Amino acid sequence: MNPAAPKQADPPTPLLEAHRLCKNFGGVRAVQDISLTISAGTVFAIIGPNGAGKSTLLNLLSGVYQPDAGEIRFAGLDLVGLPAHRRVRHGLARTFQKIRLFKQLSVLENVLAGYHTRHSIPPLQYLLHGAAFRADARRCRAGALDLLEFVGLAHRAAVPAGSLAYGEQRLLEIARALATSPRLLMVDEPAAGLNGAEVAALLRRIANLRERGVTIVLVEHNMDLVMTLADRILVMDYGERLFEGAPGEVQAHPEVIAAYLGAEAL
Amino acid sequence: MSKTSPNAAAQSRERRVWYLIAAVIVAALPLFVTDSYWRTNLIVCALNILLAIGLDFVLGYAGQLNLGQSAFYGLGAYSSTLLVLKLGLPFWAAFAIGTLMAGAAGALLSFFAVRLRGHYLAIASLGFAVIIYQILLNWISLTQGPLGIYGIAPPPTVAFPGLPQIAFGDLRNLFYLTAGFTLIVYVLLDQMVHSPIGETLTAIREDEVSAASLGIDGPKWKAFAFAVSSAAAGAAGCFYAPLVGTLVPDAFFVSESFMILAMVIVGGMGTLVGPVFGAVLLTILPEFLRSLGDMRLIIYGASVTLAVLFMPGGIVEAFHLLRHRLFPEGEMR
């Protein structure tokens, strides 16, 4: 994969824009004055040391938290005040840093739950299943199995999600989020706890998703993954924006190196 | 992927066969049970099943511990009876209003308890049950308090042209009415839990934040589950009043909520069929223990405790384990 720097030459249409977002928890300024513009069809990475506010930013974008100040616009729509579940219908999906699968449900059932907003069943057929109900069930099942195929978990469809290996659970979270048919997918540290081969497979899949037109927001510590995939990188530290640029620029930036390696490295 | 879809169709057909078997059992029971004492017990069974499957819908599927079931039961019983007595409404109109009122009260309770879960929701719903009990006891001008309401008439006789009249003073007919209604509610709930609604409710039970990330509106669906659950209890109450003919607040004391909870747990929560067995067992068992006097309470309590300790998945899980042991090859069907 090429770090696709040339893409930035002519500014593409922004899909997600945030302007001067702030979020405090008591006295802690978790996110301070963050602005960003994410273009459709790109991979936007957010990096920074632990506690830099990356996950809080993701929670603001996905609606788990509401910002204290600032604006968020998604494809022209004002997202501030919109709860998380409503944002899903507009095409935002996410995974969680701390895995939050439905552990007692099967792998397939986890993905099927992701079809919540996409059923087309006449209300009465929920009470008495008819032809339309069965057609919908077939459609969702086939789609869910395709998604499991995509993340390489089709052979595990029937086992409880809680019995999957750690890396598999991360992939299942991605498949479940994809079931909502997102235009923008936010993945929170998808490579955490994965081995080298798994990271390579994850990289291929995220690249594949971008080719399918899904815009990706990637919060990640694995620098190889970020530098290979990202079109644009936002570096955060202490809740603030430290730098934003293409991968090459980020790697060369002295303040970024300082934040990661300590000031002595300069 | 094509191998799983015919499977789903087969399961759907299999469910319909079970509905039919249940209907045959309901139709046949009064032929074997002829004395009025046991017929009354059968009707009580049907009402307890209605209460238990209603509770299981909100507890076993949506994962919300509702200890207010006794209050919704009482709301249905008192409101339908009072609508008939004080306003002269026909029984079936009162039945519909009583059921809807209990359902609305459930949705309202869920709405106010939206930030509560687990133990906190349990305490809030328990508080609600205590409040309703106290209202029934103390609003004497309306409910006659501990004196009770007497002489409640059975549902009005139904007459279809060309057929013999169906009088509900007859216990056999009252059984068909209550058991038939319970069976219909069972079928509707069973269809719902095997639809995307079931997926949605279990997603909320497992992890609400995660469910929201899939577009699921947790508070709305919890209110829905609460409304369905409490409406079922309300309907049971509407039938209870004409069955017993007498209403006293003590019939809807908080302990009734725990009885219903025991039926769900002993049967196996999160499976709709489990609470049916739980309700039948815990309704009939005390009748057999009646000759033991007060000892029966000890035996009853001990058996519930042992059931919870040694088969936490209830009767349904015990059945699956037994089948697995007898037929170790696995799926026999």
Image (cartoon, rainbow, N blue to C red):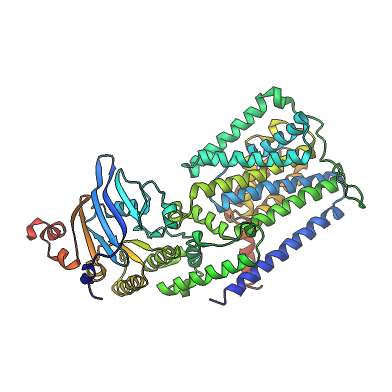
Left/right placement of residue A16 relative to residue B67 reads left
Residue B74 placement (x, y as % from top left):
68, 36
Tally of marks: 0
Left/right placement of residue A103 relative to residue B322 reads left
Looking at the picture, tell me which residue is in the foreground, A73 or B281. A73
Q: Quadrant of the C terminus of chain B?
A: bottom right
Residue A215 placement (x, y as % from top left):
33, 65
Left/right placement of residue A150 relative to residue A41 reads right
- In the rendered image, is residue B198 in sight? yes
Looking at the picture, tell me which residue is in the foreground, B1 or B93. B93
Residue B94 placement (x, y as % from top left):
74, 38
Q: Quadrant of residue A228?
A: bottom left
Figure check: B251 above or below A167: above
Figure check: A65 above or below A198: above
Residue B102 placement (x, y as % from top left):
64, 40
- In the rendered image, is residue B303 in sight? no
Residue for point 28% across, 43% down: A24
